[in-house]
Amino acid sequence: MPNIREAVGAGGKNTIHDVAMVQFMLKALKAPGGHAYFSGGYTNRFGPDTQSAIAAFQADHGLTRPGAGGPEIAGLLRPGSATWAALDAAFQSVDAQYRLARTTEGFGIVYVGMPDSRLAESVNGLRASSNLQPEFSQKVLQLMQLFFKQSGIAWSLVPRTGGWRTFAGQEGLTSDAGYGESIHQFGYAVDLTIANFTWFAPDLRSHKSPVQLSGMDQRSIAQLYAARDKIADALKLFRTTKSGDLAHLQNYDDDGLDSVSSLMALMHQVGPKKMRWQPQYRTPTNYLCDLGLGGDLYFVGTAIDIWQQDATKHVSPADLARALTAKLKADPKFSLDAYLGRASAPAPSGSDGDSKPSEIKAADIKPADIKAVQKILRAEFDAAAANWKLWTPVRYPTSERRRPNPVKR
């Protein structure tokens, strides 16, 4: 039901949520002449028009004439005052949908509060996302409950992608993170939205946003997420530093967590070849890798390139030739055929069985060889995806992060 927390008017605190509610109520109410007390669309910004509307309502109800309890201050509406009591009583005659209106701190839109059953649905949806880490899930649960108690609004997981994701679940998302680079894939992040949210436009028309607050202006959406984040901050839930990703909350601070190095550490732990990896840049991150050969590191593409086995972004033939030549020199028993997964060629007649070349040139590398290496690299990611529960956070060694990649995808 309608309420205000601080005074609205000349000398009042005039918070956006209280101003919005007073303007909303005075726009819904008609003066004796048949016109609305507040004629414009409610804006949540206090000005002379709001002050005049309050004063006109007070005058029509005899609230600014001297009486037994003393006059109200013209143009000032305080919680619990005679003016508020009269406004609240008069508001009982307006359309039933308006009588359900309410606001919450820091949000300048008037809306309809949700029933307890909506919170229960959100909580059940969170609990059904069973792969979220338990301590993190508990903090998100507390956020949902505290915000609902404060506002009557139930936050819920974004359908399908808002909770735990597989590596493959990163496919097609608008995200700077590649496969295995999002902590969604390790149960430490959620994306929250408000589903089926009913709110009122400045002209008092009712809107229902099925998901993602569709139809609402970006300034108001940011206000609503900021109100959520006041509670999230107290619970040590962190926002991402990525601009525009308001829905996202996570267990770690972006400025400290190196999600790419965390993925590399997991791959080194569980990957079939225990490859050495090194990141270059970020968003997207280029990877350098020893290809499981134990030698120098070579460019192998981004996580997306590796996962999708991109035909155009991969280790170069020249680099693969150098890596294989170095391995052959370091380990005479090394088998090219076994490494590349190809059938062994029969030894030439009269040879001693050792037909391996002493040096491999770029021209010797075939497209099938590049494809074979791409499969080897992808196998490291697959192993990390299968063993995601072993993931542990790796932090940046200093406060400095890697530079952004100058080449955007």
Image (cartoon, rainbow, N blue to C red):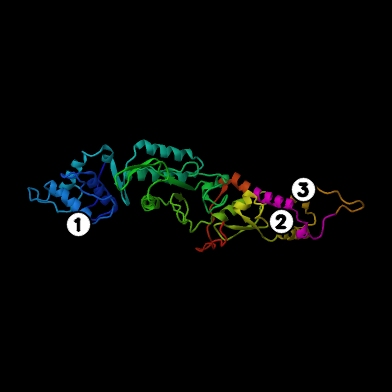
Instruction: Work out whether mark 1 precedes mark 2 in sequence or the reverse, and give the earlier one.
Output: 1
- Magenta residues (range): 355-379
The amino acid type, in three-letter code, at marker 1 is Ala
Q: CA distance from mark 2 to mark 3?
A: 17 Å
In the image, taking residue 308 as reference, residue 138 lies left or right, namely: left
Q: Nearer the viewer, mark 1 or mark 2?
A: 1
Q: Is residue 388 among the parts visible in the rendering? A: yes
Q: Position of residue 352 (x, y in %)?
A: 89, 53
Q: Which mark is residue 293?
A: 2
Residue at 71% in and 53% down: 370
In the image, taking residue 32 as reference, residue 5 lies left or right, namely: right
Residue at 46% in and 54% down: 240
Residue picked out by circle 1? 10
Q: CA distance from mark 1 to mark 2?
A: 75 Å
In the image, taking residue 293 as reference, residue 351 lies left or right, namely: right
Dot 2 crowding, Cα within 10 Å, few <14, some 14–19, many 20+: many
**Foreground: 156 or 406?**
406
Location of the N terminus by quadrant is top left
Dot 3 crowding, Cα within 10 Å, few <14, some 14–19, many 20+: few
Residue picked out by circle 3? 342
Q: Position of residue 36 (x, y in %)?
A: 21, 46
Q: Main secondary structure of the magenta part?
A: helix
Instruction: Work out whether mark 1 precedes mark 3 in sequence or the reverse, and give the earlier one.
Output: 1
Instruction: Work out whether mark 2 precedes mark 3 in sequence or the reverse, and give the earlier one.
Output: 2
Q: Position of residue 53 (x, y in %)?
A: 19, 51
Q: Position of residue 79 (x, y in %)?
A: 21, 49
The amino acid type, in three-letter code, at marker 3 is Arg
The question of residue 75 being in magenta is answered with no
The amino acid type, in three-letter code, at marker 2 is Leu
The question of residue 371 being in magenta is answered with yes
In the image, taking residue 102 as reference, residue 138 lies left or right, namely: right
